[in-house]
């Protein structure tokens, strides 16, 4: 398999705080990898190092030459007073054809929002528009930073389902960062458990049984591997997890 991106011995400090400590990570073509960890465990920082937005203090990141990355940010503030339609938003930072915009929105699961104001979208629609914009890059790898924060659980499950469809149709690799264990994991080929360093990694069932994982997340998330179809009878909400209608 072709390795798309490889991080070796990544260490990073914010002030005196060691945020990442000798982290190794490889992502191969077409795989879905989820990085899970509590808040403050360095997940977003690692993503930003992989993208090239942050330089590590130690270690190296190697990207396949010409690697195209589609990035779906954690949240994006669009000034509600500024009128901008979804279609115009997709022209940022560079103009795209109507055909490409239409196809990207359809693939992202938001086929009929092109004419709507960004400020009028629901949380789920907004995330799908961000996904559409990332797909316009025709990415080899799609990176999502806590992309379902603020969606309720069925909304999250639907969004992840969409990501799986995208991977099937585009053949791109997917790297997701999340602290929501209950929906994320079932879709992943590999789960990396991060708390400043890699505590454990492997297939979802291996990781959820690992002592390091239980130490971080407790056994209360025994339903972490609940697949999408179990979502209706599985109503864990993180207390900091604001549920919004999708």
Image: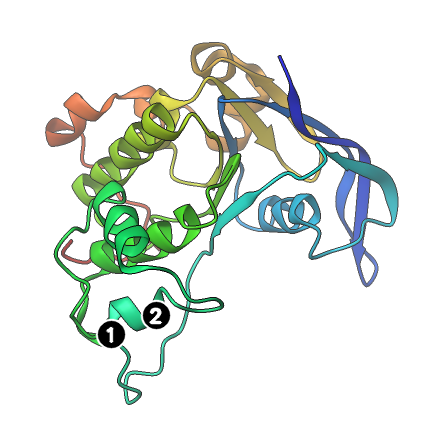
- Expressed as whole percent of the image width and height from the top left, the position of residue 12 reads 79, 49
Q: Residue furthest right?
A: 58
In the rendered image, the vertical position of residue 117 relative to residue 17, given as above or below: below
Mark 1, Cα crowd under 10 Å, few <14 / some 14-19 / many 20+, is some
Task: Tell me where residue 90 sits by quadrant.
Answer: bottom left
Disc 1 element = loop
Residue at image location 84% in from the left, 38% down from the top: 60
- Expressed as whole percent of the image width and height from the top left, the position of residue 136 reads 41, 50
In the rendered image, the vertical position of residue 121 relative to residue 60, given as above or below: below
Q: Which residue in the structure is indicated by mark 1?
A: 85
157 with respect to 26 (left or right): left
- Expressed as whole percent of the image width and height from the top left, the position of residue 53 reads 69, 57
Q: Which residue in the structure is indicated by mark 2?
A: 89
Residue at image location 81% in from the left, 63% down from the top: 15
- Expressed as whole percent of the image width and height from the top left, the position of residue 160 reads 30, 35
- Residues 155 and 180: in front is 155
Disc 2 element = helix
| Residue 122 in sight | yes
Instruction: Please identify the quadrant where the N terminus is shown.
Output: top right
Residue at image location 16% in from the left, 71% down from the top: 116
Mark 2, Cα crowd under 10 Å, few <14 / some 14-19 / many 20+, is some
State how far apart marks 2 and 1 are (Cα): 6 Å
Q: Are marks 2 and 1 in contact (CB under 8 Å)?
A: yes
- Residues 66 and 34: in front is 66
Residue at image location 36% in from the left, 56% down from the top: 130
- Residues 196 and 189: in front is 189
């Amino acid at each position: 398999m072709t390795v798309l991106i490889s991080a070796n011995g990544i260490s990073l400090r914010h002030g005196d705080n060691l945020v990442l400590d000798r982290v190794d990570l490889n992502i191969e073509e077409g795989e879905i990898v989820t990085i899970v960890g509590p808040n403050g465990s360095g997940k977003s920082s690692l993503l930003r190092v992989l993208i090239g937005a942050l330089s590590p203090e130690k270690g190296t990141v190697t990207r396949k030459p010409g690697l195209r990355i589609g990035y779906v940010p954690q949240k994006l503030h669009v000034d509600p007073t500024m009128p901008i339609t979804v279609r115009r938003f997709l022209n940022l930072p560079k103009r795209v054809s109507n055909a490409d915009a239409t196809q990207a929105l359809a693939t992202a699961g938001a086929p009929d929002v092109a004419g709507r104001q960004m400020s009028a979208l629901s949380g789920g629609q907004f995330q799908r528009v961000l996904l559409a914009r990332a797909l316009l890059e025709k990415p080899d790898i799609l990176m999502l930073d806590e992309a379902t924060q603020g969606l309720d659980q069925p909304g999250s499950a639907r969004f992840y389902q969409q990501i799986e469809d995208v991977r099937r149709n585009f053949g791109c690799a997917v790297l997701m960062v999340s602290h929501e264990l209950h929906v994320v994991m079932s879709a992943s080929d590999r789960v990396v458990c991060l708390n400043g360093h890699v505590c454990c990694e492997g297939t979802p069932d291996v990781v959820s049984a690992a002592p390091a994982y239980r130490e971080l997340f407790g056994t209360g998330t025994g339903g972490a591997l609940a697949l999408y179809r179990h979502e209706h009878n599985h109503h864990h909400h993180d207390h900091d997890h604001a549920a919004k209608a999708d």
